[in-house]
Image (cartoon, rainbow, N blue to C red):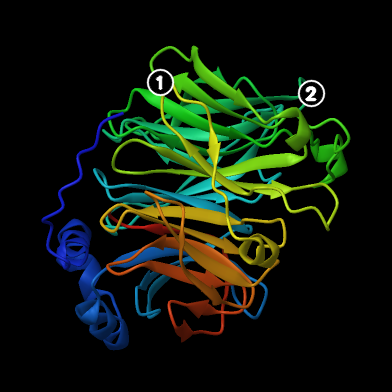
């Protein structure tokens, strides 16, 4: 899983690339305040939010926390995906939602709503193939109690063209290697069914795992089950380093006073290795890591915990804690020019505050 990272990119490349992609027509529709915010920005992000009136939407926002534009959503969003080739972003409905909305950030196309096929619901996450041809979506085949990856043709109106087995249950987050050959599925191991809403049905016999899947055939390449002593450690979110190393974050469904490892990593052909965090950091995370991101430029890993109201930065080479800060209801995390942009359910975004409740995840429109 090789890298195409260019360490000499200008710090303004993401804003300029975003403006080129969006085009003059889109920029001319912005309010003066938004134009000013965009002109000062080094990077642009997108995240789901809830307005004070209870409505939902997606916002593009700068690393200073200035909202540029808002697009309404029919239901609450969760994870986001972005395709740098076409400039389209996708917001996935929160589990057990059955819709995903595709937004053209260039402003040249109407939003597209993707509906889950019968007998499926979305788990709230997905990713684009590096060439932008396919959208991969984590889905629940709930009657068969198995995770699947729905395949959607981004060149044909996001028509569903097939699916792969994730070789696990409770599939949550997905990632794809930089060369497009390998899909990574975080199989949380928790059985759910829409008849029971968000109820977790098998906490006494969970099956969490991490699976590497051939993106061309759907064949299982490698699978890591959680150790028997950590079967209540749900594998939830993943991100990749520039060297192809896979970082994963977990949520523990066992006793509150347990202090299991919550973050780890591995590469193709390796066993998983948990990060040995200081006890005070593990305790602060409150057995729940809600989001994870890798800053490839700095070789650091950012994690957040809304339950612990904390954001932590780790050295990817050593696992050492670089920074730990209190962020009330910390939610999303994404790489910034320096460190990470962090959001919260309370309207905090990278040091600024707004009257929206940011949802669980942030996507950077462009990569470091």
What x and y, as percent, mark residue 12?
16, 68
Disc on res. 215: 1
Number of labels in the image equals 2
Q: Which secondary structure lies at badge 2? A: loop
| Quadrant in the rendering for residue 50 | bottom right
- In the rendered structure, the answer to whether residue 304 lies left or right of residue 293 reads right
- Residue at horizontal 46%, vertical 52%? 319
Q: Which numbered disc flags the more N-terminal residue, 1 or 2?
A: 2
Return the residue nearer the eye: 331 or 68: 331
Image quarter hosting the C terminus: bottom left
What x and y, as percent, mark residue 156?
36, 30
Return the residue nearer the eye: 224 or 170: 224
- Residue at horizontal 50%, vertical 37%? 174
- Residue at horizontal 58%, vertical 54%? 78
| Quadrant in the rendering for residue 305 | bottom right
Neighbour class for label 2 at 10 Å: few (<14), some, many (≥20)?
few
What x and y, as percent, mark residue 17?
17, 59
Neighbour class for label 1 at 10 Å: few (<14), some, many (≥20)?
some
Measured along the vertical axis of the image, is residue 49 above or below residue 192? below
Measured along the vertical axis of the image, is residue 63 above or below residue 81? below
Viewer can see residue 230: yes
Location of mark 2 (residue): 143
């Amino acid at each position: 899983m090789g890298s195409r990272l260019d360490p000499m990119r200008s710090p303004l490349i993401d804003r300029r690339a975003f403006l080129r992609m969006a085009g003059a027509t889109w920029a001319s529709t912005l309010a003066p305040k938004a134009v000013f915010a965009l002109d000062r920005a080094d990077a642009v992000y997108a995240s789901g939010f809830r307005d004070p009136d209870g409505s939902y939407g997606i916002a593009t926002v700068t690393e200073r926390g200035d909202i540029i534009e808002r697009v309404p959503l029919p239901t609450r969003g969760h994870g986001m995906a972005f395709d740098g080739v076409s400039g389209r972003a996708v917001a996935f409905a929160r589990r057990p939602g059955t819709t995903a909305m595709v937004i053209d950030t260039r402003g040249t196309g109407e939003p597209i709503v993707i509906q889950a096929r019968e007998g499926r619901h979305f788990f709230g996450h997905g990713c684009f193939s590096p060439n932008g041809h396919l959208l991969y979506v984590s889905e629940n085949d709930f009657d068969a109690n198995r995770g699947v990856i729905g395949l959607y043709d981004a060149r044909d109106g996001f028509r569903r063209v097939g699916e792969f087995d994730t070789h696990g249950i409770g599939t949550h987050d997905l990632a794809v290697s930089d060369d497009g050959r390998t899909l990574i599925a975080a199989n949380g191991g928790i059985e759910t069914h829409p008849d029971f809403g968000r109820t977790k049905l098998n906490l006494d016999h969970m099956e969490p795992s991490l699976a590497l899947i051939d993106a061309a055939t759907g064949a299982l390449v490698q699978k890591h089950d959680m150790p028997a002593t950590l079967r209540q450690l749900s594998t939830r979110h993943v991100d990749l380093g520039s060297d192809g190393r896979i970082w994963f974050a977990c949520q523990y469904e066992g006793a509150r006073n347990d202090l299991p490892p919550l973050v780890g990593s591995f590469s193709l052909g390796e066993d998983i290795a948990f990060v040995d965090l200081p006890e005070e950091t593990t305790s602060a995370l409150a057995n729940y890591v809600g989001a994870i991101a890798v800053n490839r430029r700095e070789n650091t890993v950012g994690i957040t915990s809304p339950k612990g109201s904390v954001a932590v930065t780790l050295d990817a080479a050593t696992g050492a804690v670089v920074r730990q800060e209190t962020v009330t209801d910390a939610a999303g995390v994404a790489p910034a020019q320096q460190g990470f942009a962090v959001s919260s359910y309370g309207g905090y975004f990278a040091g600024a505050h707004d009257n929206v409740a940011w949802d669980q995840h942030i996507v950077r429109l462009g990569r470091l």
